[in-house]
């Protein structure tokens, strides 16, 4: 499926006429794990937006105010679904809900809610103890579409605690696994956000003279880390190689820091240690030349940098508040290799 296909599927599930393009881009990212890190991502998204127009599924903003011109090609800030002819709708009559869904009797449900809930009601009536399977498998079984339940955790009935994915849908998330490499026996893992920095660190750590000092190396793949980090629990158990220290080295920008905070929360819920900043690598990165970008709200910055140690948080806040960021690519392999000294304990340097 193409990026446009994933966007079209997401668009079809929306109830509002106007849909933020960030949400559509997120649907494309979810459908293609290589897209978030692709240098051509922006062009792919732009082409997909125009493909939606060609299919008659969306209209793009008419004025300049509806576009993001921060990079090329420009991207719409939102799209509008075409207006549908007005029809007279008959509100569905009362349903005989199974006991597990009895709370729905007190909720005002839309026709779309009934499309979602009727197969769930039948499942709980006929197979209340059905084995819990990945969400996409249950989605295909109940709706004939593996993508239908994508994002179900954000549905208002789920966020209000009325519908439970595990208890009622008998399903569980099946996030793409975290890419992990066991480079040595040490009980720690360093996760690296970008592919270039990951490749450089894999070369340096893979050739570390004292193998007992080296542990796991993980590839975070940008925002996908938030969903994939809990899968590390299984890998540690399967290899009988647990960790007591989790480190993250990501870009020093708003997205990288917000991703770190969210991944930390998800990881700890899964039973992992706290996700800590790789302070040594960040210190090295802070000596490099920053890149200029549009500024972002100070309130979001303060919350994002709170993941860092206090002294570093202040320094990074000042950097980002001035519209400057540091990408991992600013610390290339030769500099990285020179900064990591085999005569000094490795973990202390990270």
Image (cartoon, rainbow, N blue to C red):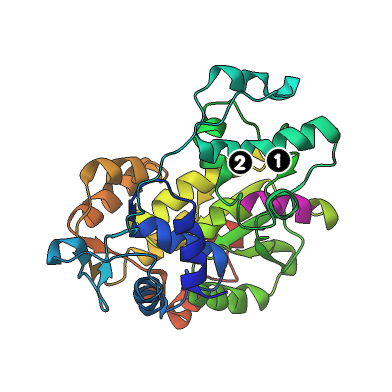
Whether tag 2 and tag 1 are in contact, CB under 8 A, the answer is: yes
Q: Position of residue 317 (x, y in %)?
A: 26, 49
User: Can residue 84 be seen from the camera position used here?
Assistant: yes
Asked whether, in this view, residue 53 is left or right of residue 153, the answer is: left
Give the residue drawn at x 66%, y 58%.
145
What is the number of the mark on residue 116? Answer: 2
Type of secondary structure dominating the magenta stretch: helix
Q: Is residue 44 magenta?
A: no
What is the number of the mark on residue 119? Answer: 1
User: Given the current orientation, which residue lies at the most extreme left position?
Assistant: 64
Asked whether, in this view, residue 85 is left or right of residue 289, the answer is: right
User: Given the current orientation, which residue lies at the most extreme front position?
Assistant: 88
User: Can residue 274 be seen from the camera position used here?
Assistant: no
Determine the CA span between mark 2 and mark 1.
7 Å
Q: Position of residue 3 (x, y in %)?
A: 48, 72
Question: Looking at the rendering, in which quadrant would you find the N terminus?
Answer: bottom right
Q: Secondary structure at mark 1?
A: helix
Q: Circle 1: is it few (<14), some (14-19), or many (20+) Cα within 10 Å?
A: some
Give the residue drawn at x 65%, y 32%.
164
Q: Circle 2: is it few (<14), some (14-19), or many (20+) Cα within 10 Å?
A: some
Question: In front: 95, or 186?
Answer: 95
> Magenta region: which residues?
229-236
């Amino acid at each position: 499926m193409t990026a446009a296909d994933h966007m079209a599927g997401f668009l079809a599930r929306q109830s509002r006429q106007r849909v933020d393009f960030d949400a559509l881009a997120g649907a494309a990212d979810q459908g293609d794990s290589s897209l978030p890190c692709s240098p051509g991502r922006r062009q792919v998204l732009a082409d997909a937006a125009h493909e939606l127009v060609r299919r008659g599924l969306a209209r793009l903003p008419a004025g300049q105010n509806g576009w993001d011109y921060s990079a090329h090609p420009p991207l719409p800030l939102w799209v509008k679904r075409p207006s549908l002819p007005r029809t007279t709708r008959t509100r569905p009559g009362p349903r005989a809900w199974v006991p597990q869904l009895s709370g729905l009797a007190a909720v005002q449900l839309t026709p779309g809610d009934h499309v979602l809930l009727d197969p769930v009601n039948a499942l709980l009536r006929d197979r209340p103890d059905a084995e819990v399977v990945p969400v996409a498998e249950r989605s295909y079984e109940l709706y004939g579409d593996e993508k239908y339940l994508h994002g179900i955790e954000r549905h208002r009935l789920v966020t209000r605690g009325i519908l439970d994915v595990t208890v009622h849908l008998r399903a569980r998330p099946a996030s793409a696994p975290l890419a992990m490499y066991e480079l040595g026996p040490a009980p720690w893992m360093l996760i690296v956000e970008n592919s270039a920095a990951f490749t450089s660190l894999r070369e340096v750590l893979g050739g570390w003279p004292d193998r007992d000092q080296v542990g796991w190396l993980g590839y975070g793949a940008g925002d996908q880390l938030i969903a994939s980090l809990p899968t590390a629990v299984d890998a540690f158990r399967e290899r009988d190689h647990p960790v007591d220290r989790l480190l993250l080295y990501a870009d020093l920008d708003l997205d990288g820091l917000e991703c770190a905070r969210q991944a930390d929360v998800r990881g700890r819920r899964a039973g992992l240690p706290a996700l800590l900043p790789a302070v040594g690598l960040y210190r090295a990165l802070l000596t490099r030349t920053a890149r200029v970008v549009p500024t972002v709200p100070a309130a979001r910055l303060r919350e994002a940098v709170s993941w860092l140690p206090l002294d570093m948080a202040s320094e990074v806040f000042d950097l980002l508040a001035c519209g400057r960021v540091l990408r991992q690519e600013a610390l290339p392999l030769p500099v990285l290799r020179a900064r990591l000294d085999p005569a000094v304990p490795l973990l202390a340097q990270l």
